[in-house]
Image (spheres, helix red, strand yellow):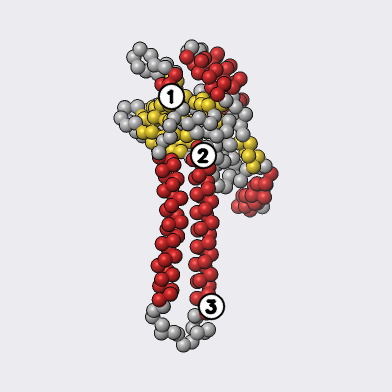
């Protein structure tokens, strides 16, 4: 059997096996996934709803145009219609083909503008996290709400690095998505993000697909965004801006935990624990990933 046949059969087998992927974790991609990642925030709920509506609308338009083309080819070809009509105007058709596209545009524009405002108008925040993209291809996080030092810097500040492949496999977490230290936030709380990049750095982009959000980190500029995790879990993302040679090694890991666990984490962080102490504590508060039917 040729290698091409083997690849074709493997592809068919994998497609047939899709239903066996009964459940996937919210907050991360799955193999052979079709469609968006499952939602973990109200914004992504809105995005998914808008996407599904557009899919229905586009499908209807495509089928309608296809039906018209087939009808015209069958009804008005030279054999079926040897004497062509000389009609040049039809008021009703002209009104319809002017009005219907306007209605279609309105059906697209109204929900899209609603979504745009929902994404960009930041609601009253329960907490703030500052995100800094570094030129060494990693992220620094600051929690100014937890207090400031004498020099006006955040007391809780840490840099998150890619978890090495061997450690990722040992911990059974996805390599290239997992980090050594996660961002911890309370579930069902509005988190305001202040996003920037090191003044001597380059443009990055902080992105969490399950939150339906992406915001650029630009040197010398502060951008703002927000998210609200509506379920406990581990949510992964990556830098979505082509930022250089280690672009692929700049993951994001967010833990949405209960308020009690978040408070315990914040209290420990304020004490500036050793890495071993923090790692041991994180194992006790790691949320169980929410499971959903895979698509």
Residue visible at 50% across and 80% down in the picture = 77
- Where does label 2 land, which residue? 42
Location of residue 104 by image quarter: bottom left
Give how far apart the Cα atoms at labels 2 and 3 are: 48 Å
Q: Nearer the viewer, residue 33 or 142?
A: 142
Q: Pinpoint residue 69: horizontal percent, then vertical percent.
A: 50, 71
Point out the frontmost of discs 2 and 3: 2
SS state under label 3:
helix
Q: Are marks 2 and 1 in contact (CB under 8 Å)?
A: no
Residue visible at 57% across and 25% down in the picture = 258
- Answer above or below: position of 129 versus 77: above
Q: Are marks 3 and 1 in contact (CB under 8 Å)?
A: no
- Where does label 1 land, which residue? 141
Most extreme residue toward the bottom is 83
- Answer above or below: position of 64 versus 83: above
SS state under label 1:
strand
Q: Is residue 238 something one can see in this rendering?
A: no
- Where does label 3 land, which residue? 74
Instruction: Tell me: 159 left or right of 223.
Output: right
Residue visible at 53% across and 64% down in the picture = 63
């Amino acid at each position: 059997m040729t290698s091409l046949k083997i690849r074709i059969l493997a592809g068919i087998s994998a497609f047939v096996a899709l239903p066996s992927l009964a459940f996937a974790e919210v907050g991360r991609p799955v193999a052979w996934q079709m469609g968006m990642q499952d939602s973990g925030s109200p914004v992504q709920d809105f995005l998914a709803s808008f996407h599904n509506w557009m899919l229905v609308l586009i499908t209807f338009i495509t089928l309608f145009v296809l039906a018209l083309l087939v009808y015209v080819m069958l009804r008005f070809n030279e054999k079926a219609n040897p004497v062509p009509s000389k009609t040049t105007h039809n008021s009703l058709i002209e009104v319809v083909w002017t009005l219907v596209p306007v209605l279609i545009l309105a059906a697209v524009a109204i929900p899209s503008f609603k979504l745009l405002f929902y994404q960009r108008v930041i609601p009253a925040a329960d907490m703030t996290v500052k995100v800094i993209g570094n030129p060494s291809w990693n992220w620094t996080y600051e929690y100014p709400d937890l207090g400031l030092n004498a020099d006006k810097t955040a007391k809780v500040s840490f840099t998150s690095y890619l978890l090495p492949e061997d450690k990722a496999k040992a911990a059974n977490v996805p390599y290239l998505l997992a980090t050594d230290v996660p961002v911890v936030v309370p579930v069902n709380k509005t988190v305001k993000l202040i996003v920037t990049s090191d003044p001597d750095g380059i443009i990055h982009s902080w992105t969490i697909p399950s939150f339906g959000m992406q915001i650029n980190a630009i040197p010398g500029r502060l951008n703002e965004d927000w998210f609200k995790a509506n379920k406990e879990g581990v949510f992964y993302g990556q830098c979505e801006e082509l930022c250089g040679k280690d672009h692929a090694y700049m993951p994001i890991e967010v833990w949405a935990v209960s308020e009690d666990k978040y408070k315990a984490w914040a209290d420990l962080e304020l004490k500036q624990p050793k890495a071993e102490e923090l790692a041991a504590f994180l194992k006790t508060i790691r949320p169980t990933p929410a499971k959903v039917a895979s698509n």
